[in-house]
Image (cartoon, helix red, strand yellow):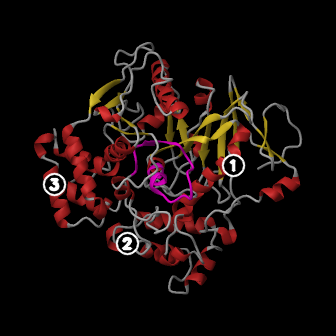
């Protein structure tokens, strides 16, 4: 981060007590403080280790002012799986972007939204999901977006990491926890209230929200949760990730048969480019023939932060009982040609008997085609049933609102389908994620802008008072909570007006409820 020697906008300066940060004004109300560090750079001996808090005493003694007017470099990226190579980015990336109203002060006590980006725990750049327009629409919140380590840099796993002498499991998730702890101590300086924090994420970010709800985090770090398209992939054991560790170590030029301390010492000296090539090569390999189904880096069941798989803990009521919004898009899926092979590739521990039961549960007569049947089975297993699981837990123990997002991304390759991340396009000015931290923003027309404002109003109403209805737009309908058996359908006005809402409520479909209950019954085998 650049040290400031002269400032043109002295009004937009925040003093955390250990350093000052100058922000970037976006008219009419938003100031962004971009790339504010929350941890020491995880480089050298800190690679593959839990994040280390900032040395605030040292920073305080230096009495520095930093330029926070430009987006920082993002965390090292992995491949998106489309044949692209990862590797762009930096390890010195443990930072947050903070968006606050221009008139906020350390006494404002505004509610806070913390956004955790998606990307399968492999890629993602918070710059592609900006929040200036959220603040400009509703200048009564503070928004924080978090950078966390990805792919092998964030989720390298080995059984020896359990005791923590040579490495740490789930380093990328520990980054998120430390960011929340930093926020608790410092967000007041930016105008936020550390006692009113809502965590929000989409896809892997939604999966992260689910994990924060069940994780042992050493005390409450948030008071509400919004989970979009919860990524319900496997949470394997470190032992199941061991072939992947050995493969990547060998590809990076380190001997995986050596003592683990020596392997880690070697891996910590390997250039980013070599690790990036190794992790990309692992992702492209056949997961069944080489790794037994576990060929990508992701959170693991460590026995400390996570004592059981998230679904099991939710069903048992062992989670942070805070108000919840949770939902999925209408057509998101993981694809495949048939249910058994598709689900086996996603959840390697499913048995032949389990897969037979899946085939029987997804009754052919309930679907218009076999393709729709397969898409629904994989989509409900991987994403959509997070709505039932989290919503059901929230309804039982606290309060929950659920949704079905039904507005296609107009730049989608499948016109008419509301696929994964369609709401991101709408909420973030027409933004689509590209490779290696890039993104393309096409902007919204007037009708899309009006709908986007409805979405943002619901979200920020929930952030402000734990209810999406209190500060919704006047044209938007009331969002019934999940205890009524209703969910809301989020879509544009079909008549393409900017003055009427197309949003409506619907009953939670009984057949979908039954299928999701079946999926929950398989959660141990699915390791989700």
Over which residues does the magenta segment extend?
208-231
Assess whether mark 1 and mark 3 are in contact (beta carbons under 8 angstroms).
no
Q: Which of 350 and 104 is in front in this view?
A: 104
Of the numbered discs 3 and 2, the one sitting upstream in the chain is 2
**Residue highlighted by disc 2:** 291
Few, some or many residues within 10 Å of mark 2 (<14, 14–19, 20+):
some
- Can residue 429 be seen by looking at this rendering? no
**Residue highlighted by disc 1:** 185
**Residue highlighted by disc 3:** 359
Above or below, 134 against 371 in this view is above
Few, some or many residues within 10 Å of mark 1 (<14, 14–19, 20+):
few
Question: How far apart are the two marked residues, 1 and 2, measured between alpha carbons?
Answer: 42 Å
Question: How far apart are the two marked residues, 3 and 1, measured between alpha carbons?
Answer: 51 Å
Few, some or many residues within 10 Å of mark 3 (<14, 14–19, 20+):
some
User: Residue drawn at (33%, 35%), measured in percent from left and top?
Assistant: 482
Q: Is 464 placed left or right of 297 in the picture?
A: right
Q: Where is residue 430 in the image (x, y as percent from the top left)?
A: 50, 32
Extreme bottom residue here? 258
Above or below, 38 against 425 in this view is below
């Amino acid at each position: 981060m650049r040290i400031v020697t002269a400032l043109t906008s002295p009004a937009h300066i925040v003093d955390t007590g250990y350093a000052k940060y100058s922000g970037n004004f976006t008219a009419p109300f938003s100031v962004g403080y971009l790339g504010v560090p929350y941890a020491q750079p995880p480089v050298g001996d800190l690679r593959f280790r839990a994040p280390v808090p900032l040395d605030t005493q040292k920073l305080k003694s230096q009495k520095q002012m930093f330029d926070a007017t430009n987006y920082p470099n993002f965390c090292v990226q992995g491949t998106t799986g489309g044949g692209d190579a990862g590797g762009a980015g930096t390890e010195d990336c443990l930072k947050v972007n903070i968006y606050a109203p221009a008139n906020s002060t350390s006494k404002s006590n505004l509610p806070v939204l913390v956004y955790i980006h998606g990307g399968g725990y492999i890629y993602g750049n918070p710059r592609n999901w900006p929040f200036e327009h959220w603040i400009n629409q509703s200048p009564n919140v503070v928004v924080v977006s978090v950078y966390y380590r990805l792919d092998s840099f964030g989720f390298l796993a080995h059984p020896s990491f359990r005791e923590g002498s040579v490495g740490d499991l789930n380093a990328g998730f520990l980054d998120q926890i430390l960011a929340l702890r930093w926020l608790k101590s410092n967000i007041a300086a930016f105008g936020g209230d550390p006692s009113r924090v809502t965590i929000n994420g989409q896809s892997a970010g939604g999966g992260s929200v689910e994990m924060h709800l069940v994780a042992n985090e050493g005390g409450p770090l948030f008071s509400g949760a919004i989970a979009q398209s919860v990524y319900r992939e496997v949470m394997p054991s470190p032992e199941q990730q061991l072939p992947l560790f050995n493969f990547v170590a060998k590809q990076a030029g380190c001997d995986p048969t050596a003592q683990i301390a020596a392997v880690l010492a070697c891996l910590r000296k390997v250039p980013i480019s070599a690790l990036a090539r190794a992790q990309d090569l692992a992702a492209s390999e056949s997961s069944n023939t080489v790794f037994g189904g576990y060929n990508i880096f992701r959170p693991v069941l460590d026995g400390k932060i996570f004592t059981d798989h998230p679904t099991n803990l939710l069903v048992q009521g062992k989670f942070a009982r805070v108000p919840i919004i949770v939902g999925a898009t209408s057509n998101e899926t993981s694809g495949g040609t048939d249910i058994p092979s598709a689900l086996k590739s996603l959840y390697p521990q499913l048995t032949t008997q389990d897969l037979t039961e899946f085939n029987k549960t997804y009754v052919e007569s309930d679907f218009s085609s076999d393709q729709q049947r397969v898409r629904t089975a994989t989509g409900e297993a991987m994403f959509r049933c997070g709505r039932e699981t989290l919503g059901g837990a929230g309804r039982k123990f606290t309060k929950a609102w659920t949704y079905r997002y039904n507005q296609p991304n107009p730049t989608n390759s499948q016109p008419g389908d509301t696929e994964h991340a369609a709401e991101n396009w709408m909420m973030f000015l027409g933004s689509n994620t590209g490779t290696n931290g890039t993104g393309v923003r096409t902007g919204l027309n007037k009708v899309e802008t009006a709908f986007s404002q409805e979405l943002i109003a619901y979200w920020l109403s929930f952030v402000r008072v734990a209810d999406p209805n209190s500060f919704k737009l006047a044209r938007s309908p009331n969002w019934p909570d999940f205890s009524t058996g209703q969910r809301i359908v989020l879509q544009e006005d079909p008549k393409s007006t900017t003055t009427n809402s197309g949003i409506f409520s619907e009953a939670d479909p009984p057949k979908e409820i039954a299928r999701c209950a079946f999926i929950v019954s398989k959660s141990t085998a699915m390791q989700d």
